[in-house]
Image: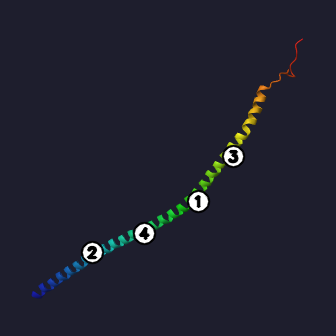
């Protein structure tokens, strides 16, 4: 009987060692999964920051050129307004005289279709 109880003891010890190794493997697996998740998160953050930086550079390039375009448009608009204003002041007097002469210089005459009733 002593050999049988000794065999059972060995089996129990072997089962306990296997159980401990299994728990240790589970812990290592959990740690590795956690580490992999952290590495993936760090890689994703790095990629996101790189893409945002590229986007900002492209946006700055596009918006910078749009800023130049808007400045040119503003300058052209100012020049056009200045030209129109000067043209208005140059031609205002002449046009006023023409309008007044057309309105005030009336020469009454009989319409050609008018028939005098006899």
The dot on residue 83 is 3
Which one is in front in this view, the residue at disc 1 or the one at disc 3?
3
* Quarter of the picture holding the N terminus: bottom left
The dot on residue 65 is 1
CA–CA distance in space, label 1 to label 3: 27 Å
Furthest residue toward top: 118
Residue in front for this viewpoint, 81 or 26: 81
Q: Are marks 2 and 1 in contact (CB under 8 Å)?
A: no
Q: How many marks?
A: 4
Q: Earlier in the sequence, mark 2 or mark 4?
A: 2
Residue in front for this viewpoint, 39 or 59: 59
* Quarter of the picture holding the C terminus: top right
User: In the visual, does 11 lie left or right of 68?
Assistant: left
Residue 51 lies, with reference to residue 103, above or below; the image says below
Residue for point 20% across, 83% down: 14
Which one is in front in this view, the residue at disc 4 or the one at disc 1?
1
CA–CA distance in space, label 2 to label 4: 28 Å
The dot on residue 19 is none
Q: Earlier in the sequence, mark 4 or mark 3?
A: 4
Residue 90: quarter of image = top right
Q: Earlier in the sequence, mark 3 or mark 2?
A: 2
The dot on residue 46 is 4
Q: Earlier in the sequence, mark 4 or mark 1?
A: 4
Q: From the image, tell me which residue sits under label 2.
A: 27
Residue 97 lies, with reference to residue 46, above or below; the image says above
């Amino acid at each position: 009987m002593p050999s049988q109880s000794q065999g059972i003891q060995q089996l129990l010890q072997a089962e306990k060692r296997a159980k401990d190794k299994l728990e240790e493997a589970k812990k290592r697996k959990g740690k590795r999964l956690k580490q992999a998740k952290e590495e993936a998160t760090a890689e994703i953050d790095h990629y996101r920051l790189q893409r945002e930086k590229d986007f900002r550079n492209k946006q700055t390039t596009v918006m910078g050129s749009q800023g130049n375009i808007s400045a040119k448009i503003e300058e052209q608009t100012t020049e056009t307004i200045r030209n129109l204003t000067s043209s208005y002041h140059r031609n205002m007097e002449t046009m006023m005289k023409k309008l007044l002469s057309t309105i005030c210089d009336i020469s009454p005459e009989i319409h050609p279709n008018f028939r005098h009733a006899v």
